Image: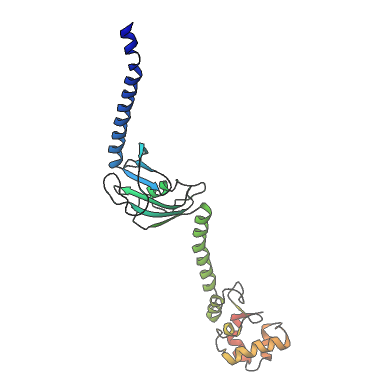
Amino acid sequence: MGRLGISAPRAPLVAAAVIVVALVALGLAVSLFSAGGVTVSRADSGSEARGSDGAGEGGGSSSSPSGGGARDAGGAQALVVHVDGAVARPGVVEVSGSSPRLRDAIEAAGGLAEGADTGSLNLAEKVSDGQKVHVPTVEEAQAAAAAPAAGSAGASGAGGGQGAGAAAGSGSGGGPSSASGLVNINSATASELQTLSGVGESTANAIVRDREQNGPFSSVDDLMRVSGIGEKKLAKIRGSICV
């Protein structure tokens, strides 16, 4: 009975010692794993270790100081990257380890948010210190893709006009010109009217002054009422104007 009474209290101590040893061994294994992978961190949270192949998260975490000059378990300099756009937690993050990639910086920012579009990004790109990364949304990506198409269509429309009328359509942004690229003599400015062949500054000002005093032109032939425009000049620009 005396021997049993002495041994019983030691059982919990032995069990506790075994647990401590196991935890120390686990911590050592995690440390060794992290040293060979990529570590990502934020200023307001701890770091997470990933294998260098990016297959997933490591089995534990290691402490990484925030701010410039931080180093990972292998002594590599931490790279500070600003990540914004369609990510869960936009902000400044730290990425360190062996060849950190763009996907690591995005993971440090909480990963992709709903509606993110990575089609324009190279997730395998190596990140550099001080780099700014913007993850666009689907809407942003669609708008960016549509912009060049719209510009190309506008250029094609302007080129579809003939002679000086085409130049006028391009310079005026389509306002005083018709869809065919013709210059509208009732809405074109003096500068835009000067793009017409043979129309100088004085004639252009006379056209503007006449329509202000006498009302808009009912037809192209009404230009004959403007001083300085005769049949020959009208015939020269007739194919480039409209009302």
| Residue 12 at x, y percent in the picture | 36, 19
| Residue 140 at x, y percent in the picture | 51, 56
| Residue 230 at x, y percent in the picture | 63, 92
Q: Is residue 1 above or below residue 133?
A: above
Q: Quadrant of the C terminus?
A: bottom right
Q: Is residue 104 above or below residue 162?
A: above
Q: Quadrant of the N terminus?
A: top left
Residue at 32% x, 45% y is 38
What is the basis of the colouring in this image? rainbow
- Determine the residue located farthest toward the front in the rendered image: 2
| Residue 18 at x, y percent in the picture | 31, 23
Q: Is residue 162 above or below residue 76?
A: below
Quadrant housing residue 6: top left
Which is more toward the observer, 6 or 97? 6
Which is more toward the observer, 1 or 108? 1
Residue at 67% x, 86% y is 221
Quick check: 215 left or right of 92?
Answer: right
Quick check: 176 left or right of 71?
Answer: right
- Determine the residue located farthest toward the right in the rendered image: 214
Which is more toward the observer, 163 or 202? 202
> Number of marks in the image?
0
- Determine the residue located farthest toward the top in the rendered image: 1
Which is more toward the observer, 99 or 65? 65
